[in-house]
Image (spheres, rainbow, N blue to C red):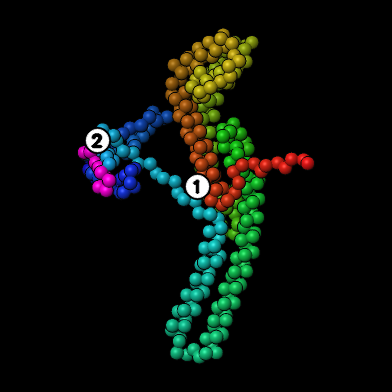
Amino acid sequence: MKIHLRMKCKACGYWNRIEVDKLFIEQPSSEPEVRVLIPFYKPLKVETCKKCRSVIAEPKELIKIIRGKHQVIPISTKLNLWILALPISSIASVFIVGFYFYRESFDASAFSTAVSSLLSAILVILLVWERLRDSLFKKLEYLHKNFLFKLYNGTPHLFWTLDGTKKLRSDLGKYAKFLNLQLCPSTLLKEIDRFLYLHGEFYKRYQEIEELAKKQIEKPINLTRDLLQYHIGLTDYHSSSYTDEAEEIYKGIAQTITKENPKLVSEAKGFIEKTRESEKQIHSQLEDFLKSNNLRLELEPSVPWL
C-alpha cells in the first residue's frame, strides 16, 4: 500500500514528504497463538531533504514510527487555568457582553458600579487562588515526601519490592487528589497497574518452573533461585560463589525444563521482559513529572554535626 509519509531531516530539521510502501512485519510473541504485526514503511527510492539535500531515507532501510513522549503539564499551570484564568475570563466576558447589549441604558454611575463589582470579583478570585496555591504546594510536597519519591527511588528495584509497590499505588490512588485535580499523572497510575499485572503473570509461570525444578533436585540440595533463573534465561547475571557442580546441576535442570515445557519458559521470558520495560516507563514518567513540578530527584543532603 503506497502512502505519503512526513519525515524530519536529522541534519537541518526540515519536514519532507516522501512516498513509501506500508508493510506489516510479524514480530515474536510470548503467546504462540497470537500474531503481532508491526507497521513498517519502505521508501520507494533514495530520498533527499529538499532544503539541505542530505539523504533521509533509502529503500534498503525500513522506517518504524515510534510514538514520542507527551509533555507533562505542571500542576501549578493546571491550577492557574482552573482557578484563575477560566473564572476571570468568564466574568470579564459576561461584563463585556452585558455592556455591549445594554450600553444605551448605562450611565456613568451604573458603569462605575459595574466596573467596581468586576474588580471586586477578580480580587476575591485572586485571594482564593493564592490560598489554594499554597494548599496545593503543601499537598504536593506531602505526596512527594511520602509516596512519589519512594516510588522514584525504588524504580530500579520495583521488581523485587512488589508489596511496597502495591501499597504505594494504593496510597497514590487515595491521596493524589486536590479538589478536582489529579496530582499524579493518570498514565503513571495505569503504567503501575500494567506493571503489577505483568509481574503477576510472570510470577505464576515462574512458580510452575520452580515446581518442575524441585522435582528434579535431590533432597539434600535446596532450590537456589539465583542459579535457576540464570540458567533458564530469566536473568543475565548470578553470584560467582557457586561451585562447578552446582552450576552443572542447574544447567541440566534448566535444559530439561526448557525442552519439556518450551511454551511455559517462553511465556515467562516474555512477561519478565515486558515487566522490566514497564518498570523503565514508570521511572521515566516519574522523572518527567518531578522535573516539571520542580520536585527533587535525589535525597536531601544530611547536615553534618558541628
Q: Where is residue 243, by image quadrant?
A: top right
For the point 56% across and 15% down, which residue is it? 215
Give x and y (percent) for residue 210. Answer: 55, 21
Give x and y (percent) for residue 238. Answer: 56, 20
216 vs 16, left or right, is right
Q: Nearer the viewer, residue 194 or 236?
A: 236
Q: Residues within 10 Å of mark 1 (few under 14, many from 20)?
A: few
What type is the residue that disc 2 sits on? Answer: Pro
Decide whether residue 233 is among the magenta residues.
no
Give x and y (percent) for residue 75. Answer: 55, 55
Residue 59 tag number: 2
Decide whether residue 52 is among the magenta residues.
yes
- Lower sequence index among marks 2 and 1: 2
In this view, which residue lies farthest toward the right? Answer: 306
Magenta span? 45-53
Q: Nearer the viewer, mark 2 or mark 1?
A: 2
Report if the CB atoms under discs 2 and 1 are less than 8 Å apart.
no
Q: Where is residue 160, by image quadrant?
A: top right
Q: CA distance from mark 2 to mark 1?
A: 36 Å
Whether residue 45 is visible here, answered yes or no, is yes
What type is the residue that disc 1 sits on? Answer: Thr
For the point 62% across and 12% down, which residue is it? 221
Residue position for label 1 = 187
Question: Which quadrant does the N terminus fall into?
Answer: top left
Whether residue 209 is visible here, answered yes or no, is no
Q: Is residue 170 above or below residue 248?
A: below
For the point 58% across and 41% down, which residue is it? 152
Question: Which quadrant does the C terminus fall into?
Answer: top right
Give x and y (percent) for residue 220. Answer: 64, 10
